[in-house]
Amino acid sequence: PVALNIPHYSQIVKNPMDLGTIKHRLESGFYEEPKSCKADIEQVWRNCRLFNPRGSWIINNAVSLNKVYLREWKRLKIDQLWRVFVDSQGNKTMRRGRLNTTAARALQMLNRNQS
């Protein structure tokens, strides 16, 4: 927030989250299950609505990204893929790495649509 010249952001947004942090968490194997990742992505949208004025371009873009995210999460069957990897792999690190590659691709798609 300070780098973006919005130092008051933390006074309004108590649980900050951004897509860059989510991407890093996916790549590092931070998420144990898809609902944790999903919760972080949804926190980004909540924070956007909380901080920005209703009807602003940033909220309109967040709404559009949320639609893409929901559609792609369902299309890529992330919840089901996660369970398949959990059930089929004994090695947790390997399981995380494979799933996170798929999830990271989905997040990259979101990032591309943001540009």
Image (cartoon, rainbow, N blue to C red):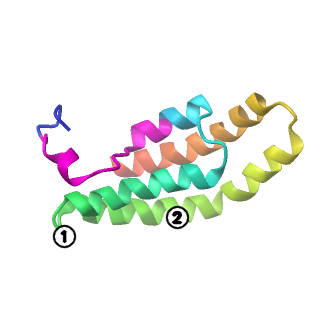
**Eye-nearest disc, 1 or 2:** 1
* Quarter of the rendering containing residue 102: top right
What's the residue type where badge 1 is placed?
A: Arg
Instruction: Tell me which numbered mark, 1 or 2, is placed earlier along the sequence.
Output: 1
Residue displayed at 64% across by 62% down: 75
Tell me the magenta residue range: 6-23
Q: Residue 92 at what x, y percent from top left?
A: 77, 33
Residue 108 place in picture, x, y as percent: 49, 42
Q: Are marks 1 and 2 in contact (CB under 8 Å)?
A: no
Residue situated in front as seen by the camera: 79 or 61: 79
Could you tell me which residue is drawn at 59 percent across and 35 percent down? Answer: 30
Q: Secondary structure at mark 1?
A: loop
- What residue did someone put label 2 on? 70
Residue 39 lies within the magenta run: no
The answer to which of 55 and 108 lies nearer the viewer is: 55
**Residue at point 69%, 32% (across, down):** 97
The answer to whether 86 is drawn above or below residue 64 in the figure is above
| Residue receiving disc 1 | 54
Q: Amino acid at mark 2?
A: Leu
The residue lying at 22 percent from left, 45 percent from top is 10
Residue 12 quadrant:
bottom left
The residue carrying pointer 1 sits among few (fewer than 14), some (14 to 19) or many (20 or more) residues within 10 Å by Cα, namely few
